Image: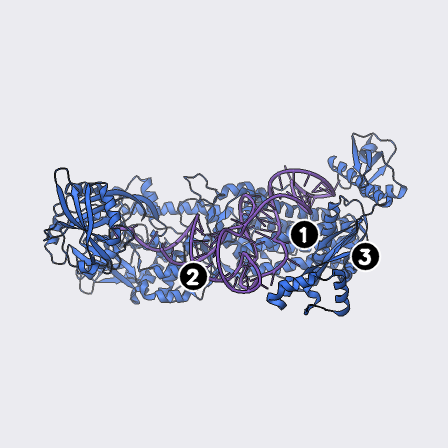
Chain colours: A blue, B purple
Amino acid sequence: MEEVKGNINFRKLDLEIKKFWDENDIYKKVKKLREHNPEYYFVDGPPYCSGAIHLGTAWNKIIKDTVLRFKRLQDYNVLDKPGWDMHGLPIEVKVEEEYNIDSKKDIETKIGTERFIEKCKEFALKNKKVMESQFKNLGVWLDWENAYMPIENEYIEMGWWTLKKAYEKDLLLKDLRVGYWCPRCETSLAEHEVRGEYKEVMDPSIYVKFKLKDDKENTYLIIWTTTPWTLMANMLVSVHPNFNYAYVKVILDNEDRETEEYWIIGESLVEEVIKRAKKNHKIKYHKIVKIVKGEELEGLKYIHPLLEENKKQLEFSKMENLHKVVLGEHVTLDGGSGLVHTATGFGEEDFEVGKRYGVPIYSPIDDNGRYIEGEWKGIFVKDADDFIIERLKEKNLLLHSGKIKHTYPHCWRCKTPLLFRATEQWFLKISKIKEDIINHAKGVYWVPSWVETRYVNGVKFVGDWNISRQRYWGIPIPIWTCERCDSYEVIGSVEELKERMINDIDLEDLHKPTVDRVLLKCPCGGIMRRVPDVLDVWYDSGLAPYASIYSKELKKADFIVEGHDQVTKWFYSQHALSAIVFEDVPYKKCMMHGFALDEKGSKMSKSLGNVVNPDDVVEEYGADILRYYLLSANKAWEDIKFSYNELNDVRSLFNTLWNSYAFAINYMVLDNFVPNEEYMEYLKDEDKWIISRVNTLTKEIIEELEIPHLHSYTWKLKDFILNDLSRWYIKLIRSRTWREKDDPEKLSAYQTLYYVLMKLILVLSPVSPHISEKIYQNIKTEDMPDSIFMNKLTVDEKYIDSTLEENIGLIREIVDAILRGRDRVKYTLRYPISKITLPKTMEEIVNKYGYIIKEQGNVKEIEVAEFKGNISIKPNYRELGRVFKSEVPKVVKAINSVDPKVFLDELEREGSLKIQNYEIKPEYVQFKMEIPDNIIGVEFSKGSVYMDIKLTEDIIKEGLMREVIRRIQSMRKDMDLDIEEKINIKMEGISFDKDMLKSIEKEVRGKFVEEITSDYTQDWEIKTPDKKTYNVKISIVEVKKVKSK
RNA sequence: AGGGCAGUGGCUCAGCCUGGUUAGAGUGCUCGGCUGAUAACCGAGUGGUCCGGGGUUCGAAUCCCCGCUGCCCUACCA
């Protein structure tokens, strides 16, 4: 045990402890210690290796670390592999940027797939290193050396194995479907990749006239669209069978002549459409002339507006079932015209309608989103919008052209607006197992519980999972198709691949382009080549529960925790894959946490400049304070508003803890204290009390961490440190620390402090490992383990005494009440109170613990008696309500009608009282006293304390003595004297009798002298409660100095 | 549009499940006090339409219904 300095730099401390852990291999020793114990299986949701971590990522790992440290303290063998998400578009995009390329063609021609893959790998590994060191800086203990990485062959193989399982269970499917397509990345995307990627954009909003075929009357269908470019591929117009559609007669006033037309519009949208049309046209007259049901419109043929611009449409126009009105339930009347332009190759519902009516799926664009035919061949479709609008105008088919602000999906990595496009992709048939997934969810312990609802609602909406990406950096899809007969095969392992391989390819690395070179032979005799796609990166992390430990059996994770964005992502993706392979959910307990926002509640973003870097916070405050703050600022599942103010509060909490520790240790060091269980025999009640408290605290904390409710955990810790330890217990034992060296009461106080500190740092260590370890290292004895984390968290049930906790709690209330009362009448603590009166119910407690009240309240005598004063009465509504229900107001009136004094007497005599037929029992009412002038009364939970505040000469003298002592002590402190240092004092302006002078001398380790040569003199003005003033002059000199002169 | 969460002093949040006396804590500000562990602490004062409106009840911050606002998730406004 060494002396502790008061001013502590928590950052220095945490670096020192990290060094200690490193140099002594503590993490490994802790792991080794429990390697044969029952397992606690944790699966880390892998962060993406995109660069540096942010506050939210830090929070995430801190939660994990805290829970796992707790589980280690419970003696589990914690399986704590961290993971990394390393494949996928984000990294591809970054590498592309670095090499200044922006298309897939460039990748293949400019730098080559092989080098590209190599660069992606480098990039991922480089970032992993940076992020790992940041996590370590937070004090996160995970098995960094054995992290799982989806880019390793073994992991990739697990992905193949999984896909083969899906294939064998008939859950793998190749299908032509309309899905999201990123024209920049030239790949399809899955729906979960698009989640949260809807951004507000301005798009054209045009109303177009489609002229009916074989019609003499100039009748037009009016359609609305925000994607003019899709008109090139328009095949049908959909209407809702049950809606009303109006034929609107319109007379247009062109400059030279008037024309008469009929427009077909959804009835409720007529006025809105006309209003828009009026902006571009002079409409002289319009009137609804006929109303029909949507179904009556079915089959009407129209003339495609862009026949000349797209020769293909000319061909289509000759086909029977094209360019006509069809029915669709998806049509709404929320906006637009009620008639929906339908392009079968460019919309999911359009696609379905097209299939239903046997219409070709027409999608005339390439992977870059450029037309492959028609007048604007080679032009990016979004750029063609303006040309098309202009052309429609020329053709007099444009009713209105405006702009609309709406949300539209974007690529999650490159932020390009997505297109909808029909392509052939590989799917996992989630639709077939969705019910199972929802059922499994019931067996999971969700924290908080409502995550289940959210999860299930999310799953209900998902479609089949598109797992194929037309990209490079990912797990290659292990499917080979035959050039000749088009059949395909799914390969489940490297071994299998080697067996089937007909050429000789070195399979050192399973990425592209290596595997692409592998050829197989089809039973039909043809050559089989690999499907060039890679797997969706969410598939990678979805494999984690079993792939991270290379297990082909399901080991359910005891615990996972991620941010709320992951509810429909990782919580789902790993469940989906496990459901396919193992028909089960891969986790037992699943917790959700929030996002880290800035002080005002806005998202942290580079553009707003409000990003808080965890490293910076750690540099200033040390890791433990950030950790504690993040776990205590709110309930984990709510978003955190990061605030330096609150961070500072946490720092003061730790300062208090540190000072309590320093106080205890420094006195122990001074007295060469050696902890010894035998001192426990001399425990006083307050010692037993705090020992009981710290055990109760431990017990409660174990429950909270078990859930885990990290907010309750940290709040309880704080309450204990501030209230129980620092503000109460240490105050109580202060005088004991000034006793003689081997005074048993002093030693037992030390022993208590020692015991409590040990217990406290152990429950504190999961959240604040560095500070706990630091304290542990200083106070541990030879026979204790090397690190605090090698200990076991236990509760000493035998020390828990809840009655004692309650009673001391009451004593504390009484002391607080006394202090409050004193304050109210300016009767300061230095002046004793001659007598207080407490209610009779307190008798037993006062007999036992009255000495605490006397000492802390500076009280000479405690009387236990019913205080006689004027009595008032108060109804107890809770009790009354239970008995009298709706009669309560009447009963209260009755109670108030009786003289409280009579009421009380009667109750005491008879046990109950009848008023107006209501029987009143004692528990229905409460009595309060009113008090005479020289007495003050202050309430506490079990009654009132009455204090006699009459001043006598003795009381004043005693108070003055304390006044003087305090001033001398304060001067000692100014002089920066050692606690043991002896002094000579000269005091003028006040006199005490001999005994009192002696007491003062003893308290301040000094001697009063007549003459003094001092460099420190101070004048004091002392005001007593009886309004007298003393001007006192005090001079002090160290005895040491006098002697040396 | 559907689902989830939240709305309580200037600020950050408890309390709500299980209704009950005067709605709490921390922080801020004002005043006072205490102090040989504590740039710490204690007390008083200041500050509240408990988001709004209905309902149930003797009694609602708490339970129910209808709204409003914010955040998140889901969602092809063609």
Q: Which of the marked residues, 2 or 3, is nearer the chain's N terminus?
A: 2
Asked if residue A633 can be seen in this view, the reply is no
Looking at the image, do the residues carrying marks 1 and 2 touch, with CB atoms under 8 Å apart?
no
Looking at the image, do the residues carrying marks 2 and 3 touch, with CB atoms under 8 Å apart?
no
Q: Mark 1 lies on which chain?
A: A
Of A479 and A322, the residue lying toward us: A322
Q: Name the residue under label 2.
A: A453
Asked if residue A511 can be seen in this view, the reply is yes
Is residue A95 placed above or below A442 in the rendered structure?
above
Q: Residue at x 86, y 41 (%)?
A: A997
The kind of residue tagged 2 is: Thr
Q: Residue A725 carries which label?
A: 1
Residue A996 in percent (x, y) is at 87, 43
Q: Which of the marked residues, 1 or 2, is nearer the chain's N terminus?
A: 2
Check the picture and name the quadrant holding the C terminus of chain A: top right
Query: Which SS class for mark 3?
Result: strand
Of A495 and A899, the residue lying toward us: A899
Mark toward the viewer: 3 or 1? 3
Left or right, A583 with respect to B13, comes to left
Q: Mark 3 points at which residue?
A: A863
Whole-Å distance between the Cαs marked 1 and 2? Answer: 42 Å
Q: Residue A530 carries which label?
A: none
